[in-house]
Amino acid sequence: MGELINIDPQDIKGKYLTFSLMEEQYGVNVDWILQIIAIPDITKIPRTPTYVKGVINLRGKIIPIMDLRLRFQLPEIDYNERTSVVIVKVKMEKADIFIGFIVDKVSEVLDIMEEEIEKTPSFGIEIENQFILGMAKVKGNVVTLLNVNEIIEAIDLSIGDEKNHFLECPWQKK
């Protein structure tokens, strides 16, 4: 926690889907994006963190849905016609994981060049910045480039005395 991630801007340049949370711009590499959908009916799951809104059935796949505002400890808002779910696909060791991120609104796809990216800044205090790959300066705005793996890997729930990873099926033994 609080450990600085030193990723070379050369390694994270590319096309990014940008979206806003509280008027701030964030970006996820398009290689992670499966699709963007309007807010569907979400089935609530008991005993999950407040940022895990539940699951949806998307073409026969059960997809966990996470509100990124709440994940980043930002104030909750009512969803509106601009609120979207960005479905991302992450390749894990044993299988691909799909998860939906609720965002305030999707902006655009930007081609972010190496010279527009700076490393995650040191804030002089210990803060959790493992979700951030880097900061991009594009069209006069700052876009925070997100590390999707870290956002997903950090979903760890404590239930009773056991530790369960939300994205693993509890009925599948390792």
Image: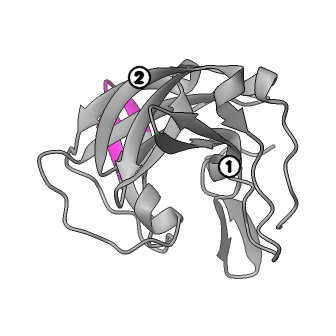
Looking at the picture, tell me which residue is in the foreground, 6 or 30.
Answer: 6
Q: What residue do we see at 56% from left, 25% from top?
A: 32
Q: Position of residue 150 (x, y in %)?
A: 71, 48
Q: Is residue 26 above or below residue 163?
A: above
x and y percent of residue 25 in the render? 44, 46
Label 2 belongs to which residue? 109
Q: Which residues are magenta?
A: 55-62
Which residue position holds label 1? 132
Q: Earlier in the sequence, mark 2 or mark 1?
A: 2
Along the viewing direction, whichever of 93 and 79 lies nearer the viewer: 79
Residue type, mark 2 in image: Val
Secondary structure of the residue carrying tag 2 is: strand
What secondary structure is found at the residue carrying circle 1?
A: strand
Where is residue 78 shown, x and y percent of the image?
19, 66
* Quadrant hosting residue 139: top left
Residue 146 among those drawn in magenta: no
**In the picture provided, is 37 more to the left or to the right than 66?**
left
Label annotation for residue 39: none
Quarter of the image for residue 17 reads top left
Mark 2 Cα-neighbour bin, 10 Å: few <14, some 14–19, many ≥20: some
- In which quadrant is the C terminus drawn? top right
> Height in image: 105 above or below 165?
above
Visible residue check, residue 52: no
Point 11% across, 46% down: residue: 81
Q: Is residue 52 above or below residue 65?
A: below
Q: Is residue 169 visible?
A: yes
Say how many tags the image has: 2
The quadrant of the rendering that contains the N terminus is bottom right
CA distance separating discs 2 and 1: 18 Å
